[in-house]
Image: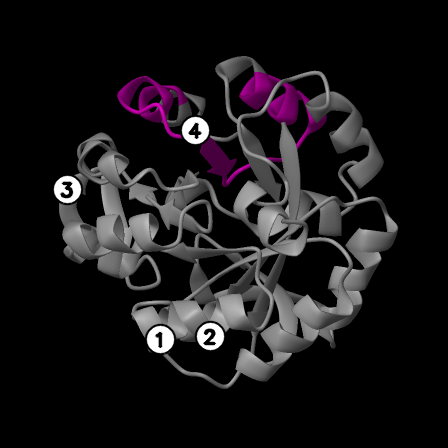
Amino acid sequence: MVVFPAVDIKGGKCVRLLQGRPEAGTEYYEQPTQAALHWQQEGARALHVVDLDAALSESGENVRCVRDIIQSLSIPAEVGGGLRSLESVEEMLEVGAARVVVGTRAAAEPEWAVALCRAMPGRIVIAVDARDGEVAVRGWREGAGVSVEELARRLEEGRPAAFLYTDVRRDGMMRRPHFEGVEALLRATSVPVIASGGVGSLEDVQRLGECGADAVIVGKALYENRFTLAEALEVADAFPSRLPVRPVELDERICP
């Protein structure tokens, strides 16, 4: 099972929010690149990078910061936050993102997301963030009027690299992931699932592996030293994953 340390960017700084609320954030690094390099040095095999400002307001002020992170790393990074057009997705891939995460537009226009996944195989992760079972969009501020499982079934035909499942109410709370939601999504689709939100202990990582999750995103628990990245990797390594750390398609381009 893949472990993605999270590097969330707001106002040019590395922060963690509670339940996605901009007013409830904690700053951990003045320079997000420092956070990224720290997790790489600690043994991360890949990172999860989110532009929170873009997710909340479609601002492009952090694009340079995201680019700097990607180009400073020797490990792959998946990038999300406000990517709602073909042009923005292509921009992130062109600057070196291994994968990009789309959510809001995928929920509003499933056919667009299916076409995007087909055009860029192995490079697109679709976020199916949930609040009380309903998909949450636009920085988690609005409901999309569709359940997580229903949206996943609609989008599965595009064969996305993975679905990213986050329980909004648990994100940043370190009070147990929504295991039942992860299991329901795994039953609804054959696409790999990345679990996020609420991880606060190594037992949570263990349980997600037992649920069948292919990857887990860990944020605040690492920044607050609830456990080390090495410990999380040791637990996760006991479980298989259908999600390669680096997209196979990317490796084929580098080494034809």
**Magenta-drawn segment:** 183-209
Numbered tag placed on residue 178 in the rendering: 4
Residue at (57%, 41%) from the top-left corner?
248
Crowding around mark 4 (Cα neighbors within 10 Å: few <14, some 14 to 19, many 20+) is: many
Q: Which structural element holds mark 2?
A: helix
Q: Nearer the viewer, mark 1 or mark 4?
A: 1
Q: CA distance from mark 2 to mark 4?
A: 33 Å
Residue at (53%, 26%) from the top-left corner?
242
| Amino acid residing under circle 2 | Glu
| Amino acid residing under circle 4 | His
Crowding around mark 2 (Cα neighbors within 10 Å: few <14, some 14 to 19, many 20+) is: some
Q: Which residue is mark 1?
A: 87
Q: Which residue is mark 3?
A: 146
CB atoms of marks 2 and 1 within 8 Å: yes
Q: CA distance from mark 3 to mark 1?
A: 26 Å
Q: Which residue is mark 2?
A: 91
